[in-house]
């Protein structure tokens, strides 16, 4: 039985004061239902959120990490530094990182492996561009991204990873994939995992949909068979909207 997991990705929004105000409000709204939740925030806001959400069941996640233990990598943050902060999750391979910061299938795989040596649970993003969808290659692209991400990872570790299917053309555009399109792609990811491992392992993996999820479309998306959760950008920035999605 997969427990639904709905997470918010703040991207590069909210300073410390705003994060504090959000946390205070969100804590009073979250009822610890049977839906797991977490907030992926910028690094400077993480210690505050870890503190504020202690004992509430609300998880805290970073949006990126470096795969090396340490080294001359100016501007980067290591897995052990995240462990020190006490975060529960870390995003890997978000399309904005792939698009603007040179993230590749190879670095995604290295980051997953580095995180799996710790208790920090990875959420890895995959998804096709508009061009790739228009040329009918979306399943091939997403399946290949999934295979590359999970390369050399054991079945036991694979079950700890959440996959977020985020079509690039639906992120921040207000354009959502139809529930059927999202379901079909999440099914494709699960079948790819079954091919790499086995059906039992594939059935354990939480697969989220992300891309313009909002209170108005959350129920339809969450009711789809293969969709176990959502990764919410814009609509997670307001506690009331985010809680509405969680209480779909
Ligand atoms: P969006 O972002 O909900 O604003 O489309 C989703 C994401 O990038 O994770």
Image (cartoon, rainbow, N blue to C red):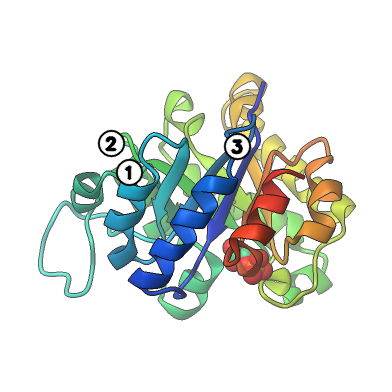
Q: Is mark 1 on a helix, strand or loop?
A: helix
Above or below residue 87? Residue 9 is below
Q: Name the residue under label 2.
A: 118
Q: Give the label on residue 213, or none.
A: none
Name the residue at 19% across, 46% down: 84
Q: Position of residue 228 (x, y in %)?
A: 69, 38
Q: Mark 1 or mark 3: name the one nearer the start of the chain.
A: 3
**Residue denoted by label 1:** 115
- Within 10 Å of the Cα at label 1, are there few (<14), some (14-19), or many (20+) other Cα atoms? many
Q: Residue 116 appears at what percent x and percent y? A: 34, 37
Could you tell me which residue is drawn at 46 percent across and 71 percent down? 97
Mark whose residue sits in front, 1 or 3: 3
Name the element at disc 2.
loop
Closer to viewer: mark 3 or mark 2? 3
User: Could you tell whether 244 is left or right of 84 in the image?
Assistant: right
Instruction: Please tell me which of labels 3 and 2 falls first in the chain.
Output: 3
Sort mark 2 into few (<14), some (14-19) or many (20+) by Cα contacts within 10 Å.
Answer: few
- Which of these two is toward me, 22 or 88? 22
Q: Where 169 sits versus 39, above or below? A: below
Q: With respect to residue 229, does 157 lie above or below?
A: above
> Which of 234/116 is in front?
234
Residues marked 1 and 3 touching at CB (< 8 Å) = no
Q: How far is mark 3 from mark 2, CA to CA?
A: 28 Å
Query: Which dot marks residue 31?
Result: 3
Image coordinates of residue 230 in percent, x first then y, are 66, 50
Residue 69 in percent (x, y) is at 16, 51
Give the spatial CA distance, label 2 vs label 1. Answer: 5 Å
């Amino acid at each position: 039985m997969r427990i639904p997991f709905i997470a918010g990705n703040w991207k590069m929004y909210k300073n410390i004061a705003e994060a504090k105000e959000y946390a205070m409000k969100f804590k009073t709204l979250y009822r610890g239902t049977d839906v797991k939740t977490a907030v992926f925030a910028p690094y400077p806001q993480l210690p505050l959120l870890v503190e504020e959400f202690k004992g509430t069941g609300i998880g805290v996640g970073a949006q990126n990490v470096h795969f090396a233990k340490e080294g001359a990598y100016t501007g980067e943050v290591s897995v052990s530094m995240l462990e020190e902060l006490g975060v529960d999750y870390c995003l890997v391979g978000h399309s904005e990182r792939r698009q603007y910061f040179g993230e590749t299938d190879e670095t995604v795989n290295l980051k997953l492996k580095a995180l799996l040596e710790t208790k920090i649970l990875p959420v890895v993003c995959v998804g096709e561009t508009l061009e790739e969808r228009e040329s009918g290659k979306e399943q091939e692209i997403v399946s290949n991204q999934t295979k590359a991400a999970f390369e050399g990872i054991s079945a036991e570790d694979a079950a700890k990873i959440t996959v977020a299917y985020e079509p690039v053309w639906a992120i921040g555009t207000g354009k959502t994939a139809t529930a059927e399109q999202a379901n079909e792609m999440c099914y494709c990811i699960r079948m790819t995992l079954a091919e790499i491992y086995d059906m039992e392992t594939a059935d354990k993996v939480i697969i989220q949909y992300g891309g313009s999820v909002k209170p108005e479309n959350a129920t339809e998306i969450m009711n789809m068979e293969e969709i176990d959760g959502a990764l919410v950008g814009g609509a997670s920035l307001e506690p009331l909207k985010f809680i509405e999605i969680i209480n779909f």
